[in-house]
Image: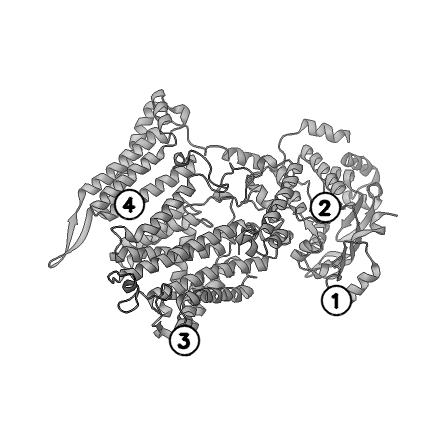
Amino acid sequence: MNRWETDPILAVEHLTMRFGGLVAISDLSFAVGRGDITAIIGPNGAGKTTVFNCVTGFYKPTEGRIALALDKLDASALDRLTAAGTRNSADRKLFLLDRMPDFEIARDAKVARTFQNIRLFGGMTVLENLFVAQHNKLMLASNYTIGGLVGLTRYRTGMRAAFDRARYWLDHIGLSERADDPAADLPYGAQRRLEIARAMCTEPKLLCLDEPAAGLNPRESAELNKLLRFIRDEHDISVLLIEHDMGVVMEISDHIVVLDYGEKISDGPAGFVRTDPKVIAAYLGVEEEEMEATGQGASA
Amino acid sequence: MANATEESAIDSGPVGAEIKDERRRQALAGEPPFKPEPTHGDRFAAALKDAVIGGLIALALAGPMIGLRTETAVGGLTLSEHWLPVAVAVAAVFVGRLILNLFVWVSWDRRTDAEKLVGKYFAGKDWVVAVIIVGIAIWFWYNNNLSIVMILVAIGIIVGLALRSRYNIKPLQRLTGGRPLGVYASSWKWPALVVAIILAIVMPFLPFANRYWMDQAIVVLTYCMLGWGLNVVVGLAGLLDLGYVAFYAVGAYSFALLATNFDLGFWVCLPMAGMLAAGWGLILGFPVLRLRGDYLAIVTLAFGEMVRIVIINWYSLTNGPDGVSGIPRPTLFGIPFERGEGSFSEIFGIPYEPIQRIIYLYYIILVLALVTNFITLRLRRLPVGRAWEALREDEIACRSLGINTTNTKLTAFAVGAMFGGFAGSFFATRQGFISPESFTAIESFIILAVVVLGGLGSQLGIVIAVIFLNTAFEVLRELQEYRMLIVGLAMVMIMVWRPRGLISTRMPSITLKRSAKAVRGELVGEGSG
């Protein structure tokens, strides 16, 4: 049995997203295993980013259920929650993401994301970016500003903890030297890494990365792979990523979901997906012998 | 995986979008891309030419502005001529620019050995220039040439800003022995701040402080406070608010009605007025903040007008266009500033003078403005302030980090409105009479102009902008309606020269190293709603 079948952190069921007459995703179901790196791949326009936006609440799905379980997913509890019409279980371990606004998904359900076109706070420094990510924790520590305004000890302790966390991630993305530089001044690859570090500063359980390797050179791609593995291994985190770079996908993914025209065409471990004739047809639309050669080049 | 490592060995340079980025950064690195500088001989000619042009511009400006003055004489106005000050001003510009061209605005390796010696001596000593300018200003002050004083101050500010932004020179650094005084501020800021505050405190007792100057100071401080309040909304949170005067009006009317109907004093009404204004900020913000950019601006403009029109028409409460009169003056722990029994002058045994009340008002607004400044500066470094700025930079990214953007915008609106309300109640108590005419849209525009001109998010920039605008209005008072035209033109020119306001850089709210530099203006977002 695979982990996404026995212990999923995220379960997407019968997800459909329509924009007017255009069906971007139709009846999509898949699961993300706890502690796995799961990749969503597919040709351009397959609906990958739409899935992401539904999971992180930036789009409201037209139909379907998206469940996030911080503990082991209990199917009957999920059905009860769905019937009750509420967003989350009383113990705040089970969330129905399709019913929550985007910022609550990030704050309560512990889902963090990055963007295809990097969205850093360009005019703020690298360190400030990492502090904004810890906003909710710091707001609490500052007693919603009042305590911070008068400088209570609690706020100072909170700031120190936030500082330590920021330092930790700066060290791991190799940007300690540039902590006080504006984020917009960083090179492209460093901006990608900073965006991941910023997402990690929210202390997520599920990290969604939208094309993290886009525009990176091979050296930076290798660094990214290392960073993602480090995040998965050291931080008890599940990663969901969209990626075109097959080098990255095949090397680090435990589980791959392939989309084409808004539908799932393949789902399984890397080895299985690589040889699935449906995937080959969708990607290349050519004969199988030709694909074999290209597929190996891409995965190597 | 062997292929991947081979590839990275071959191609480790920039690829894809990185190339463009790399090129941009190279272009910006270090000094801005100047033209190649001429050799020494040409340089003197070029410097002379530039100084002559500067002198001519100064002549063109100073000739009519300083040289000619209308004075009331028996039987009408006469035109008096003052050519000596004009000559001094032109000479100052010519000589100053020549010196700057020859000794300051030259890159180090283009200098001759002698110049290097002079340069070394003057390095970091631009306070000498500042002292000279201040000295000249004081000399003219004693000769009652206030317009020249103002011009010199303006020249000093502009030269200082230009030097600071281009060469990162820190005046007054010597005073602190080069030690950084704070993690966030560069070393010259704190002594300058202390000097400014001391000056502000002793100002009423300086020889020139008559009724006119005190009134001007009060107006300047009121607008500083309004500018700082609006700066939270526009500069930090990036929400374009064209109806800020509504909160000023709410504060003024809250105070006036509470004070006249319930017989409450200034110090009781002040916090209530601020809270009422903040409440109205929330009420306005709630439906409006789902709009963005231009739409938000239009709706806030409409709200500002609505408040004024409601005040005009709600006759039973607000007395309509007749306004509210008899608003109590502020008292010092219940001691009034007036003639007679139990008054300030009697208790302290000094002769009564009307200016005592004005001085008291001045101190109230000074304290209010400083409190506003202190709180907004502090808020900026708190999580909520960082969230405001993040909102200005990228709202979607904020939401992806779990920040409730609606609440964050509302707090910005409420805080801004609260300071507007405080300023409004001060306005009411100072005037003693308010009517809807004081709260027209033009007030909103002036406050917004102050924020934009000063530089979005910059506290100091707002002070400079207020002083500039107020001076311009006062100096051009005789021109009546044309003065708006001239001030508008001047603003357009400043915005062409510095599109992001006088002070466009942004200090980081938190830093890792003490040497952290300000963020360049062109990187800082302007917000989209």
Which kind of residue does numbered mark 3 sit on?
Answer: Asn
Q: Marks 2 and 1: same chain?
A: yes
Q: Which residue occupies the extreme left position in the image? A: B74
Residue B297 is situated, as x and y percent measured from the top left of the image, at 48, 60
Q: CA distance from mark 4 to mark 3?
A: 47 Å
Mark carried by residue A242: 2
Question: Which residue has dot 1 on it?
Answer: A85
Q: Marks 4 and 2: same chain?
A: no
Mark carried by residue B261: 3
Residue A99 is situated, as x and y percent measured from the top left of the image, at 71, 62
Between B483 and B403, the one lying in front of the other is B403
Please report the residue visible at 82 percent of the width from the left and 48 percent of the height from the top: A267
Q: Chain of mark 2?
A: A
Q: Chain of mark 1?
A: A
Number of marks drawn: 4
Between B24 and B437, the one lying in front of the other is B437
Q: Is residue B487 left or right of residue B414?
A: left
Which kind of residue does numbered mark 1 sit on?
Answer: Gly
Please report the residue visible at 46 percent of the width from the left and 50 percent of the height from the top: B456
Question: Which residue has dot 4 on it?
Answer: B151
Contact (Cβ within 8 Å) of mark 2 with mark 1: no
